[in-house]
Image (cartoon, rainbow, N blue to C red):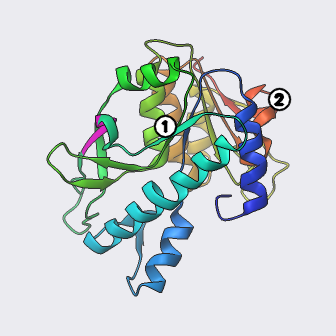
Amino acid sequence: MIDDEAKLSSFLDAFASIKERKILVHGGGKMATRLGEQLGIPQKLVDGRRITDAETLKVVTMVYAGYINKNIVAQLQARDCNAIGLSGADGNAVIAHKRKSEDSATDYGFAGDIDAVNSPLLKNLLDDELAIVVSPITHDGHGQLLNTNADTIAQELAKTLGIYYSVTLIYCFEKSGVLLDANDDNTVIPVINPDSYVELKSEQKIFAGMIPKLDNAFSALNNGVKKVIIGKAEQLTLLVESKTGTTIVNG
């Protein structure tokens, strides 16, 4: 969506129209991949996860925390939505550590797993009626930037802000929701609870790329988030109103 100006514009129209306090966590992997290739920096993925070596870290920082983040902020300002863009390093917003590989064969490089979120900072910004735009660049508190999964950042922000607010977490991506058939947008599963999730996984009816999102969704629900919705970015207004997509419930 970020690569498509028309879709991004429509999405930001919908986001700007949300009256409640709001945070937008974004990625930008396709643009980072293109720039890396143009600079002669090969991009490596393992199971959909980017291997962030030192040169790739420079690329993703430029793309995520630089161009994409500030372009979104500027676009929101044009819509009379006062916004501020943050990376995890700004205001100590998100502290992470360098990911330890589960097996010695895979080194994810400067990929980060989250340790802490500065929820008082975020609350102060939200209470000042600022929309927060967060890029998936974090830091370790010792001067090292890290590349962190945007879905995980969204989950952790939602969980920590659940202390102060009734939080709805919405995962927006290119599909209309969680699908029984990954190639058919008409097979959206409207509601998933823990029992049905176990059943869907055991029957291999959920494609692998969706499982991390659902795992994050249930983790969020188990830690104070009121509601989680997964659906198409272009349908944000309907997702906010729970009129489309897949709603994840605990029970």
Magenta residues, start to end: 92-96
- From the viewer's perspective, is 77 left or right of 139? right
| Res. 193 visible in picture | yes
Label 2 sits on a secondary structure element that is loop
* Cα distance in 3D space between marks 2 and 1: 21 Å
Which of discs 2 and 1 lies nearer the camera? The answer is 1
**Residue at far left of view:** 142
In the image, residue 169 lies in the stretch drawn in magenta: no
Disc 2 target residue: 243
Label 1 sits on a secondary structure element that is helix
Q: Quadrant of the N terminus?
A: bottom right
Q: What residue is rendered at 51% in x and 17% in y? A: 127
Nearest the camera: 113 or 85? 85
Disc 1 crowd rating (10 Å Cα; few below 14, some 14-19, many 20+) is many
| Res. 27 visible in picture | no
Is the residue 24 above or below the residue 54 in the image? above
What type is the residue that disc 2 sits on?
Lys
Picture quadrant where residue 31 is located: bottom right
In the image, residue 94 lies in the stretch drawn in magenta: yes
Picture quadrant where residue 92 is located: top left
Q: Which mark is residue 154?
A: 1
What type is the residue that disc 1 sits on?
Ala
- From the viewer's perspective, is 103 left or right of 224? left
Give the percent coordinates (x, y) of residue 23: 55, 33
Picture quadrant where residue 188 is located: top right
